[in-house]
Amino acid sequence: MPIIQSTYKPSFIFNSGFIATVYSGLVRSVKLNQKRERITLRDGDFLDLDWSYSDKASDKVILCFHGLEGHGQRPYITGTAKLFNENNCDAICVNFRGCSGEDNLLFRSYHSGATEDLEDIMKHILGLKKYNEIYLYGISLGANLILKYLGERDNVPGEIKAAVAVSVPADLAGSCEELMRPKNRPYANRFLNHLKKKLLNKAVKFPDELSFEEFCTINTLRDFDDVYTAKAHGFKDATDYYEQSSCLQFLSKIKIRTLIINALNDSFLSPECYPVKEAKENSNLFLEMPKKGGHVGFIDKRNVYYNEKRALEFILNS
């Protein structure tokens, strides 16, 4: 499809991608009543789903997937869930393995391409026989995951009607390189500290899988993916993980209506993360590139973000 001309214009203070990103990640709050459900995955591990509901009975549900080291109460996904609840659609804020406040059971956890977990979630939702329309909404890592899921398979469940992906690191290697640049050091260090804290617990629990010496070699996000992500999830190394898991290669095969919103001043994204060619060649793929917004920082009026309004418009009002 032709590239969508964005209408997003933040207030002056949020023209800075840094300020927009930090405010959205650390300051914003959203009140939402959620009910937790734990499901068992095919390998015996678990993940938690945080449900919220429309005031009226609904046959529609949106699945919201968080980013790296996020969880089901982060405002950048509960904001979307709340808006859809207010528009007669149930919502599930998914917590990836080990992200709901409790360590998962296995040495493995979650990663950008773990679509087998999304498959298990879909199987569970479809088994409820309640929803005729299912929508997918992903942020950052979660956005890459849903796009890979939609493009890597020939048959997507017919109940899935549309998807929205925000701040997508469509080329994982390029995005990792950007994150490790000096300009992004505060973000990278924050992510890495969270990841290493969790991994230290795993090293204690699974000493045969990861030695303390190996743990001590992790100094960057790429090191983390080399030492842990690749090893724990069946990849040769970080390069292999990035190559196999990046959604960019799958975008041409997406068959349902899908909107990607990537800000041009998102410091986490490399040039390859803006799939202009893929969008122009796939009639199901819509690409919007606002000039501002940072990384998941599309701040708008009344604490409803631009990307959330666009998701509602694209999914329910199209």
Image: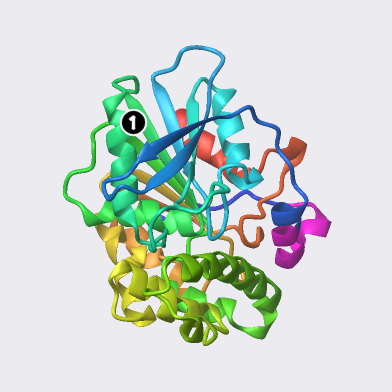
| Residue at x-position 55% and y-position 41% | 310
| Residue at x-position 58% and y-position 29% | 34
Mark 1 highlights which residue?
A: 125
The one nearer the camera, 192 or 62, is 192
| Residue at the extreme top of the image, as rendered | 56
- Residue 201 image offset from top left, x and y in percent: 53, 65
- Residue 259 image offset from top left, x and y in percent: 43, 48
Question: What predominant SS class does the magenta segment belong to?
Answer: helix
How packed is label 1: few (under 14 Cα within 10 Å), some, or many (20 or more)?
some
**Secondary structure under the numbered disc 1 in the rendered image:** helix
* Magenta-tinted stretch: 10-22
Q: Is residue 155 magenta?
A: no
Relative to 255, 223 lies left or right = right
Relative to 61, 183 lies left or right = right
Can you say which quadrant of the picture contains the C terminus?
Answer: top left
Relative to 265, 256 lies left or right = left
Q: Is residue 304 above or below residue 89?
A: below
Q: Residue type at mark 1? A: Ile
- Residue 57 image offset from top left, x and y in percent: 46, 12
* Residue 313 appears anywhere in the view: no
Relative to 107, 52 lies left or right = right
**In the figure, residue 22 lies in which quadrant?**
bottom right
| Residue at x-position 66% and y-position 75% | 189
Q: Is residue 297 above or below residue 256?
A: below
The one nearer the camera, 144 or 6, is 144
| Residue at x-position 77% and y-position 62% | 19
- Residue 312 image offset from top left, x and y in percent: 52, 34
